[in-house]
């Protein structure tokens, strides 16, 4: 089982090779800024950035090899020949297609459990919880890095698999119809998890039923001995006939894995976990109750892997710091706290974040910075009006800053008693906040990734996580 010239040629016969012999690499990266010593750099032509323009930077960072497009081989002439002689260079007709094809064959060489995780929300948190459980159990595993949940990101993580690994934990995110089937062909998960079906990427996926149908493609290659894990509280998932066994998780008593007596407070959430016949008292380090359902899904996965309950319980309770996912950090000049939930936004995740923010205690102002929820399709005006109506559930709010264009629909439904303003970008929101901040403030920042609210977080907090 070696990633060598023979292996690559067997998958991509048109591949051309130069430089040194193919060396062992620790990981693969598309971003030259993130390349580390011993990694493989894959130059991909994107819609805005061409990775071939950054090969020199990748080499200075210690890349041991590069994969490039045939059409871009001219860039090699501009690079230091001595540096190129020390690394391996693979030229292929289409970098992205070739890497995905190579990863699919590489995946076929492994018989270890592969957990595929999809869902409208909760993928990354569920992945991190399962990784904690596996680590505490002493398993050697590969888990998707950061937010690498596209087809090419999936391929990069599969290429990290080595003979010593006992488990793979892979995120699988989609935004267009047909993507899940293609990603399932690549990852071939042996355990599939659907965390939640919500109003996300509706422009490319359609209605909730359409989204559920797409997500269920994660089970496409399942046989009778494969087991799926689904949110049993959602009828759109639980009232479907499957050809293979299912574990259902949720708050309802019909689920095999249950979260009961869920109680959020200022900083934590407590609940009773019922894992089949066993019961455990759980404390999570967040008051966002969405995390409970991530813990239930992770517990089900740990159970399927045969990991002892004691280890599962310890793993799901470990503190999690995930960038942009309801992470609390300090404001500059000791002005208070900021809750960074700026990674993405849907109607469901907005509601969960606001309900959790309501439980946060503050000696100063409580301010919510809410950006556009993107990719909601024709129903976007409706969901943004609903956002304003939902603010009635957050009576402790003093002020709201609406950021973007779509939140213009929110203005008419903001409750009386909550002051608000509407600004076009994160820059204006940042300036407004700087003028308003007093001691003991609490700020929630939430919006779709395209709104770039993470820049606001970086401007206002002590350290940019």
Image (tube, rainbow, N blue to C red):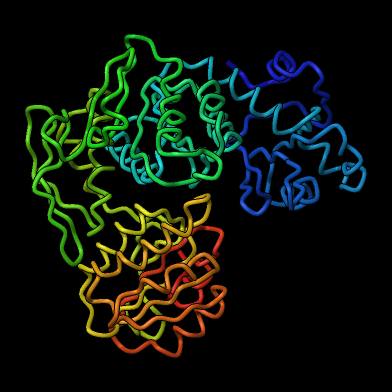
Q: Work out whether 458 lies above or below 282.
A: below
Q: Nearer the viewer, residue 385 or 228?
A: 385
Q: Residue furthest top?
A: 224
* Image point (41%, 26%), residue name: 216
Q: Quadrant of the C terminus?
A: bottom left
Q: Nearer the viewer, residue 286 or 121?
A: 121
Q: Work out whether 276 lies above or below 426.
A: above
Q: Quadrant of the N terminus?
A: top right
Quarter of the image for residue 253 reads top left
* Image point (25%, 62%), residue name: 356
Quarter of the image for residue 369 reads bottom left
Q: Position of residue 227 (x, y in %)?
A: 31, 19
Q: Position of residue 364 (x, y in %)?
A: 26, 85
Quarter of the image for residue 440 reads bottom left
Q: Nearer the viewer, residue 68 or 140?
A: 68
Q: Position of residue 463 (x, y in %)?
A: 45, 71
* Image point (70%, 33%), residue name: 96
Q: Work out whether 334 lies above or below 25.
A: below
Q: Nearer the viewer, residue 35 or 20?
A: 35
* Image point (41%, 43%), residue name: 120
């Amino acid at each position: 089982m070696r990633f060598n010239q023979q292996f690559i040629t067997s998958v991509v016969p048109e591949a051309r090779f130069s430089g040194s012999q193919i060396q062992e690499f620790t990981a693969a990266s598309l971003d030259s800024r993130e390349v580390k010593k011993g990694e493989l750099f894959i130059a991909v032509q994107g819609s805005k950035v061409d990775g071939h323009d950054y090969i020199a930077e990748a080499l200075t960072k210690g890349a041991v090899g590069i994969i490039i497009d045939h059409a871009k081989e001219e860039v090699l002439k501009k690079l230091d020949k001595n540096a190129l002689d020390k690394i391996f260079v693979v030229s292929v007709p289409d970098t992205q297609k070739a890497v995905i094809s190579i990863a699919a064959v590489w995946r076929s060489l492994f018989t270890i459990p592969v957990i595929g995780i999809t869902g409208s929300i909760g993928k990354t948190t569920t992945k991190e919880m399962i990784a904690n459980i596996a680590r505490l159990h002493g398993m050697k595993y590969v888990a998707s890095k950061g937010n690498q949940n596209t087809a090419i990101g999936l391929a990069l993580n599969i290429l990290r698999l080595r003979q010593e690994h006992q488990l793979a934990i892979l995120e699988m995110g989609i935004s267009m119809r047909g993507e899940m089937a293609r990603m399932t062909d690549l990852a071939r998960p042996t355990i599939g998890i659907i965390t939640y079906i919500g109003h996300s990427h509706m422009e490319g996926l359609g209605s909730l039923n359409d989204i559920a149908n797409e997500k269920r493609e994660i089970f496409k290659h399942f046989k009778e001995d494969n087991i799926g894990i689904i949110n049993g509280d959602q009828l759109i998932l639980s009232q479907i006939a499957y050809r293979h066994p299912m574990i259902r998780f949720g708050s309802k008593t019909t689920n095999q894995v249950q979260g009961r007596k869920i109680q959020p407070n200022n900083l934590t959430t407590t609940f009773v976990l019922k894992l089949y016949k066993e019961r455990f008292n759980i404390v999570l380090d967040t008051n966002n109750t969405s995390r409970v359902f991530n813990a239930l899904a992770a517990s089900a996965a740990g159970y399927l892997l045969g990991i002892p309950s004691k280890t599962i319980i310890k793993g799901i309770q470990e503190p999690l710091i995930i960038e942009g996912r309801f992470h609390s950090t300090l404001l500059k000049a000791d002005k208070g706290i900021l809750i960074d939930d700026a990674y993405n936004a849907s109607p469901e995740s907005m509601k969960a974040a606001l309900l959790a923010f309501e439980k946060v205690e503050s000696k100063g102002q409580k301010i919510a910075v809410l950006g556009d929820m993107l990719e909601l399709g024709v129903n976007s005006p409706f969901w943004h009006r609903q956002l304003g109506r939902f603010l009635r559930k957050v009576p402790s709010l003093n002020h709201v800053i609406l950021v973007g264009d779509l939140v213009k629909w929110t203005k008419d439904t903001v409750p009386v008693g909550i002051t608000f303003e509407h600004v076009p970008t994160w820059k204006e929101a940042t300036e407004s906040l700087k003028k308003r901040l007093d001691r003991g403030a609490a700020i929630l920042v939430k919006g779709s990734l395209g709104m770039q609210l993470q820049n606001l977080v970086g401007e206002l907090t002590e350290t940019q996580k």
